[in-house]
Amino acid sequence: MRQYSIKQYGLFLIAVIITGIFLFPIYWMITTSIKPTVDVFSTPPMIIPENIQFDAYIKNLIEDQSILMYLKNSLIIAVGTSLLTLILALPAAYAMARFKLKGSGVFLLILLVTQMVPGILMAMPLFIFFSNINLLNSYPAMIIGNTTLALPFAILIMRPFFLSIPRGLEEAAVIDGCNRFTAFIKVVLPLTKPTLLTVGTFSFLFSWGDLIFALTLTTDESIRPLTMGITKFIGQYGTEWDSLMAVSTIAAAPIILAFIFLQKYIVSGITSGSEK
Amino acid sequence: MEANAKVITKDNSESKRNLNLKNAPNPKKEKSSLIRNNASKYIFILPAFLFVLFFMLYPIFYNIVISFQDVSIANLRGEKPFVGLANYVEVFQSEKFLISLKNTTIYTVSSIVFQLGIGFLLALFFNQKFPLRNFFRSIMLLAWLTPLVITGNLFKWLYDVDYGVINYILVQIGILSEPINWLGQQSTALIAIIITNIWIGIPFNMILLLSALQALPTDVYEAAKIDGANKFQSFFKITVPLLRPAVLVILILGIIYTFKVFDIILIMTGGGPVNATQVLPFYGYELAFINFDFGLSGAVATIILVILLCISLIYLYMVRKEESM
């Protein structure tokens, strides 16, 4: 154990206060969802909940089970997006880091620029395109839409990672009788776990939080993900904030869980995403 | 650039690969092993390339094509008449477009200034050593990671006229004499949206600035200390100039990500009241999916593209400049 000075414990205390104030909205979301309705609308606002109850959760998870359908859709779309992103990005990033490819620089530039394009610029043309091939209101349409958000980021993060893996590894594998593909699968792939987790987590989080494609590419409630579910609940509940905050907490739960378990990969994803 | 050069110089084991590929079952094997060798490299990148081409580049360019056509829900599948610049003329003449352009600018600039400023102060704070430092700075990312629909909804509750915490605190400390309807009146709606967006963006800026701070060489500070520089001097003479390239890149990224924002507008105000929070991406959405006038929406999309292109050219120029240093 490292020893800290009194000053450092002072800094710790300031950090607790800063973080506490900053994350108050999240605290407020969770506590509103577990207060009885009377306490939700108390004046002054009840900062520390006096009575805890889970009526809003019972109402929205057990009595009305429609949220489960939205959760299922969000899960299918987010997992599908992560998989498709990884399948496309992994070999591409590898090849761009390893081989001398014509046009590789241009492709990189295209990825940089497309990453910056607002979702709505993708959503409108994709809507027309999917409506012409009758693919609106389907999981594939949603997965493709969300992959357009995740793919540039994924390749831009993975390429530097492959650049950092020593080349000698595959050359040794080639001498041992692997070809380019088996060398990639047997030697390189097992080393990529951390970056796979970073990219997979981010693709999942991107599509879990997506609203634009959910709003524009689906009209059928049975396909719509949780973000659209929440907008439906907003219309339905009006100012029943306890129910709304319960639904929001349920929707945020996977983010909070992902954050707890994959913190390291999320932070590294953000920082490497800003490097060129 | 340096990285690319490394790849190029290291790519000299052609003969080894050729030997290997002779085992591959290919009928044209005898013709030219070099071509196939190259082709096999491109197979790795082909799926991603096709995806980008069909689902990203094509849609982006389709915005431009459609901006010169008259497209509504009726002729979505049929003939789309060419109308020249009519859509652009109509967009530029509409009052809503000018308001959105103005709001987008105000919104982007003020969000960035505060996100970057507060993020920088926090980064300086969290760059000091104290217990659980890593935990604190990463848990703040929850604000950035939470889906925008949830954040928007949550801030609507915080801004509530009668029971919102923000009004309560501001009245208690005497800034407001009575609760105000933040999202419901024209004068405050955009400010409320900007504050929400600042909250979302602070941790993102902080984490990036923090990693830039930690990449600074420590020996320079030691040398300055020996030369008798105090903390302020070394901050303004060393930290600030050394951080400049990183801050510029973060600034551009911030502008682009802020410019995009659509979700919190949709959830919190729907562009209202009376266009007070109308921004360009939301205007483009309304034209396409509320009015079903895809041609006009394409024109707005193309204008957004041009703006973003200018910003990203600046970005690329800065990255280049930084790399050459």
Image (spheres, helix red, strand yellow):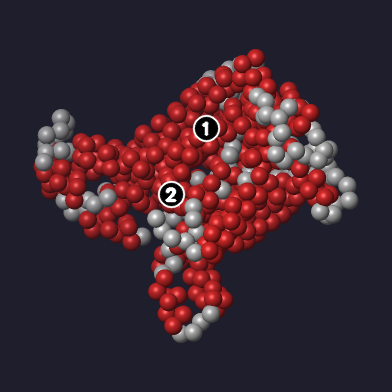
- Percent coordinates x, y for residue A31 in the rendering: 67, 35
Depth check: A183 or B232 in front?
B232
Residue A236 drawn at (x, y percent): 73, 23
Image quadrant where residue A154 sits: top left
The disc placed on residue A254 is 1
Label 2 SS: helix
Of circles 1 and 2, the one toward us is 1
Residue tagged 2: A268
Position of the N terminus of chain B by quadrant: bottom left
- Judging from the image, what secondary structure is the residue with disc 1 in? helix
The amino acid sitting under disc 2 is: Ser
Relative to B247, is A236 above or below? above
Q: Mark 2 belongs to which subunit?
A: A
Residue B133 visible in this rendered orientation of the protein: yes
The reply, left or right, for residue B224 in relation to residue A119 is left
Depth check, front residue: A12 or A147: A12
* Few, some or many residues within 10 Å of mark 1 (<14, 14–19, 20+): some
Instruction: Provide residue A215's location: percent of width, then percent of height.
Output: 62, 29
User: Given the image, what chain letter belongs to the residue carrying mark 1?
Assistant: A
Q: Residue at left 16%, top 31%?
A: B26
